[in-house]
Image: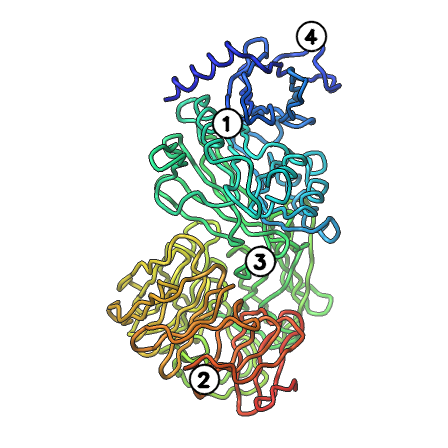
């Protein structure tokens, strides 16, 4: 196939050379070829259909075609072009030269390099966007990024015109590449006309190190594109035909090509390009506003949300960094936005008694992070007054943010106020310092009253999420222990039974760190830890002697509470994208899991399926947990509706989407057959069996939060997005 395509392209070039030119090293950077300047052979040049390579004189010729708009090059590794990698075809011009400058920065001798992906920035102008852009620019400089790529949804005409001024190759300090997204297809002669006027071709390629990077366009969007799938297919086939066998490729696009195991770029039902056969390493995209990595056969798909305002699933704002080795294999790391040398001593309250570990040491837990540069070391010292009683000692990194040490305080510190000073050092040479003080008794202080050990098996203590606890704790509360489970926790409320606490964690970088962990509730010791394939991003539950969780890939797991062995697992059939972020719940030996047509009820101890929903579909980014009443189950499809199914049969009872109920983040509490929930800017009380809105109070504040209300005899208490906790009178819904 490669030889046939290449031969056809060469014959066309020889018989009808409509365009010609030269690729050279523009040594004096005057924008034109001068005698004696070095020419570059073997550089791929395209007219948007045909692809050829420059000869030993740096020359090329192309036949052009009916749908031509640009002549562009595949920028070779080790070079960059200050005047762009493309030339817009002009009616009377036939010659297009490309002057390049050497650019070997941040690419190792073996081709290893690093690049940054941003996506879905969706700006309306440059104002207010300086912080996150500056952080990406600084990270690229500090950590030696080879390039930055934006995978689409710049957004609408105002955003398209503004974004190129915010992020371009000149002001970012590294080459900057753009993909077109669905919201970048705007009104005009064609949907991509404005994008092309500002950013150039919507499909092209470039080389860095040993990898051939390919930018492909969104197939459809807000306005119809002028290009077709056949256009992209024909160019892509010719581009790939020019690549050596086995050369690694990475494809950028705004959306995911496939949810299946094979990456095939289809022209029609029978013709396709097998990207896996071309050594595809990754398909990197955005669009879904989530952070998600998935393996498809031999290649990975990688989705990254926005660095501006975070994910649709309430994920922290971030950009993604890829570190690529000489073979084209990669690992990725999310870099969280807006954190400037953040440093907090997490395990010490203001002048509280010091908790003690089993060996008599004082645990020191520190969270630190800087967007623009990784933390390279954290150390501490201790003072009594001005006298140093523990000299500077290191902490050990536990996870993305957390560092830990066990402080051995001397006997002279007993009964004293001990000041702990922590200093963090970052890769760019910057440092941060924090101090907090503790009362040190040498024996852990006065005994802490412990609860009776009643089970707390799911969010809010039961499947209705009423949060009614049997125990009463006396103030002031203070820390008893702290344990890091090795990866980040995300909207996973701990559950408790038989003196054990259980929690599940995330793995946003596909490093195998997502786990379910059991800890001793009295001292925080890790009793067992079991891996799951993907991040667990919401609530877990206890049922039938098992810890139940569901990961972002749609797998439901049951782990034995005693030793953590896998009892059973089930594919919920929710599909590969969007990621499954919803939370599950349980009542006794009955588990309510999944969402949409993957919503099901199973027996916790055996995995037997009792029913599966067949009446409504899921949507993206839902962070709510299923809620259960006496006769109904409440599910959620974000940006669509609130749903109720019969608890015993699974048939749909009702759907509600009016007045802001279509986009919710929190699970309702079910009290006396009524649903209490916040959504949008309102608080609602609904009849759980019929969906009838019994009461609604407009709050004039944002409650798009994952905060299930606490309903007491007289108040309803819940969180807001911007104004902290809010209490309403239960009877009148007036703000208290």
Q: Position of residue 437 (x, y in %)?
A: 66, 71
Report the residue at 50% width, 66% height from top.
491
Q: Are marks 4 and 2 in contact (CB under 8 Å)?
A: no
Q: Residues within 10 Å of mark 2 (few under 14, many from 20)?
A: few
Q: Are marks 3 and 2 in contact (CB under 8 Å)?
A: no
Quadrant of residue 327 within the rendered picture: top left
As drawn, 98 above or below 124: above
| Label 1 or label 2, whichever comes before in sequence order | 1
Question: How far apart in space, not on screen, are marks 3 and 2 (Cα)?
Answer: 34 Å
| Residue to which mark 3 is pinned | 316
| Secondary structure state at the residue bearing disc 2 | loop
**451 and 55: which one is in front?**
55
Q: Nearer the viewer, mark 1 or mark 3?
A: 3
Report the residue at 45% width, 84% height from top.
451
| Residue to which mark 2 is pinned | 451
The dot on residue 110 is 1
The dot on residue 36 is 4
């Amino acid at each position: 196939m490669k030889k046939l395509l290449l031969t056809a392209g060469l014959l066309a070039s020889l018989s009808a050379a409509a365009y010609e030119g030269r690729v050279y090293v523009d040594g004096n950077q005057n924008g034109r070829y001068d005698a004696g300047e070095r020419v570059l052979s073997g550089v791929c040049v395209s007219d948007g259909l045909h692809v050829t390579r420059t000869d030993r004189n740096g020359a090329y010729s192309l036949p052009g075609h009916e749908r031509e708009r640009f002549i562009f090059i595949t920028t070779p590794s080790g070079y960059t072009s200050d005047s762009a990698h493309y030339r817009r075809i002009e009616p009377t011009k036939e010659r297009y030269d490309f002057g390049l400058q050497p650019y070997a920065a941040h690419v190792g001798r073996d081709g290893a390099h690093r690049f940054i992906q941003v996506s879905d920035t969706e700006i309306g102008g440059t104002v207010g966007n300086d912080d996150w852009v500056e952080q990406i620019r600084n990270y690229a400089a500090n950590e030696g990024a080879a390039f930055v790529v934006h995978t689409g949804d710049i957004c609408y005409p105002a955003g398209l015109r503004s974004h190129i001024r915010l992020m371009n190759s000149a002001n970012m300090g590294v080459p900057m590449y753009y993909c077109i997204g669905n919201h970048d297809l705007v009104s005009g002669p064609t949907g991509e006309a404005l994008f092309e006027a500002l950013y150039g071709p919507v499909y092209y390629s470039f080389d860095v190190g040993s990898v051939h990077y390919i930018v492909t366009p969104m197939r459809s969007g807000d306005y119809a594109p002028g290009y077709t799938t056949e256009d992209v297919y024909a160019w892509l086939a010719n581009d790939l035909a020019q690549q050596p066998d086995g050369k690694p490729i990475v494809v950028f696009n705004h959306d995911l090509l496939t949810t299946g195991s094979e990456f095939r770029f289809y022209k029609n039902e029978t013709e396709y390009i097998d990207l896996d056969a071309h050594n595809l390493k990754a398909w990197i995209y955005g669009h879904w506003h989530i952070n998600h990595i998935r393996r498809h056969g031999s290649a990975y798909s990688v989705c990254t949300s926005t660095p501006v305002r975070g994910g649709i699933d309430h994920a922290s704002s971030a950009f993604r960094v890829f570190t690529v080795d000489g073979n084209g294999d990669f690992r990725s790391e999310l870099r969280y936005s807006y954190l400037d040398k953040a440093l907090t001593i997490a395990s010490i309250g203001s002048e509280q008694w010091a908790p003690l570990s089993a060996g008599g040491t004082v645990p020191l837990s520190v969270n630190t992070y800087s967007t623009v540069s990784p933390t390279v070391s954290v150390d501490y010292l201790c003072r009594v007054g001005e006298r140093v009683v523990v000299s500077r000692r290191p902490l050990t990194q536990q996870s993305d943010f957390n560092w830990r040490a066990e402080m051995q305080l001397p006997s002279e510190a007993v009964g004293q106020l001990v000041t702990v000073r922590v200093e963090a050092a970052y890769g760019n040479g910057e440092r941060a310092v924090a101090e907090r003080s503790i009362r040190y008794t040498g024996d852990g202080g006065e005994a802490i009253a412990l609860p009776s050990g009643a089970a707390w098996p799911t969010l809010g203590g039961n499947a209705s999420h009423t949060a009614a606890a049997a125990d009463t704790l006396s103030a002031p509360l203070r820390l008893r222990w702290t344990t890091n489970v090795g990866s980040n926790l995300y909207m996973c409320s701990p559950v408790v039974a038989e003196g054990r606490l259980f929690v599940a964690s995330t793995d946003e970088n596909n490093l195998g760190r997502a786990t379910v962990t059991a800890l001793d509730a009295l001292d925080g010791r890790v009793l067992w830890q079991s891996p799951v394939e993907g991040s667990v991003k919401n609530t877990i539950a206890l049922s039938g002697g098992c810890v139940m969780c569901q990961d972002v890939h749609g797998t439901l797991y049951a782990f034995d509470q005693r030793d953590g062995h896998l009892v059973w697992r089930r594919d919920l059939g929710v599909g590969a994208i969007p990621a499954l972020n919803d939370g599950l719940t349980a009542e006794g030996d009955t588990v309510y899991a999944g969402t949409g047509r993957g919503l099901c009820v199973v027996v916790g101890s055996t995995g037997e399926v009792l029913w599966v929903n067949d009446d409504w579909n899921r949507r993206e980014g839902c962070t709510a947990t299923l809620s259960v009443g006496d006769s109904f189950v409440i599910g959620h499809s974000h940006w669509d509706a609130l749903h109720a199914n019969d608890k015993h049969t699974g048939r749909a009872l009702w759907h509600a989407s009016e007045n802001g109920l279509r986009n919710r983040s929190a699970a309702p509490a079910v009290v006396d057959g009524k649903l209490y929930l916040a959504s949008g800017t309102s608080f609602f009380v609904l009849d759980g069996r019929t969906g009838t809105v019994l009461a609604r109070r407009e709050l004039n504040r944002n409650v798009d939060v994952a905060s299930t209300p606490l309903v007491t005899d007289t108040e309803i208490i819940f969180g807001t997005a911007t104004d902290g906790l809010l209490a309403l009178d239960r009877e009148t819904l007036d703000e208290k």
